[in-house]
Amino acid sequence: MYAVVGCTDCGNLWLLEDPGETAQCSRCGKRHRTRKLRRFFESDDREAARQARAAMLARKGGHDEAFADLDDVATMEARLNDVGVEDRELLERSGVDADEVAAAGDASAGRSRSRQEIVVDAVREGDRPTEEEVVAYATDRGVPADAARRLLEALTRRGEVSESRGRYRLV
């Protein structure tokens, strides 16, 4: 079951599928109890719900007549695949070797670590490291010192890392 629902705070309309106990507005982030949300439209068909939402947004924006002249949402979406330029063609038109780009992407795949992962690695690999040891490890791997300190503090607050007498360990 799909329902078009609206946020009581900002007026945003969105599709709700198989509602749980709460739902969050995609625009303002307000959390709503789903049973209290007003359902403007309901259908078992997702495309029908999308079309209803689009019509409501057009009406809300004063574009009823223009919307009436358009194809349905699913048809317009299908046409998107037929327009534009493929990535490879765009790269080649720009004078970039698409094969080199693909090779560079393949070479770096799996190597990139987030800043948080690097800080966790520093704690894991160190023997109960100090803050400065964690920061040094992280900065050697491209994490700014201030960011490493903030991440270490956040991990400690969340209980993923513990600190005792200035030394850190994973929990």
Image: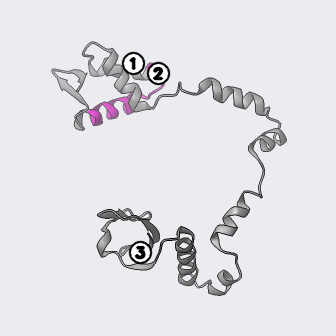
State whether residue 1 is above or below residue 111: below
Label 1 sits on what residue type?
Answer: Tyr
Q: Look at the image and say whether residue 150 sits in the magenta stretch.
A: yes
Whether the residues at callouts 1 and 3 have beta carbons within 8 Å, the answer is no
**x then y, percent, for residue 88:** 77, 40
The span picked out in magenta is 140-155
**Residue 112 percent across, percent down from the top left:** 52, 28
Q: Are marks 1 and 2 in contact (CB under 8 Å)?
A: yes
Please identify the residue farthest to the front as the structure is shown.
Answer: 44
N-term-proximal mark, 2 vs 3 = 3
Seen at 41% across and 23% down, the residue is 138
* Mark closer to the observer (2, 3): 3
Residue under the point 77% across and 58% down: 82
What residue would you read off at disc 2?
Answer: 141
> In the displayed structure, would residue 87 be above or below residue 5?
above
Q: Which residue lies under the disc numbered 3?
A: 6
Query: Would you call the spot at circle 2 few (<14 residues within 10 Å), some (14-19), or many (20 or more)?
Result: few
Task: Determine which residue is flagged by label 1.
Answer: 137
Rendered-image quadrant of the N terminus: bottom left
Q: Residue at x 35, y 20 (%)?
A: 122
Q: Residues within 10 Å of mark 3 (few under 14, many from 20)?
A: some
Q: Amino acid at mark 2?
A: Arg
Query: Element at badge 2?
Result: loop
Local secondary structure at mark 3? strand
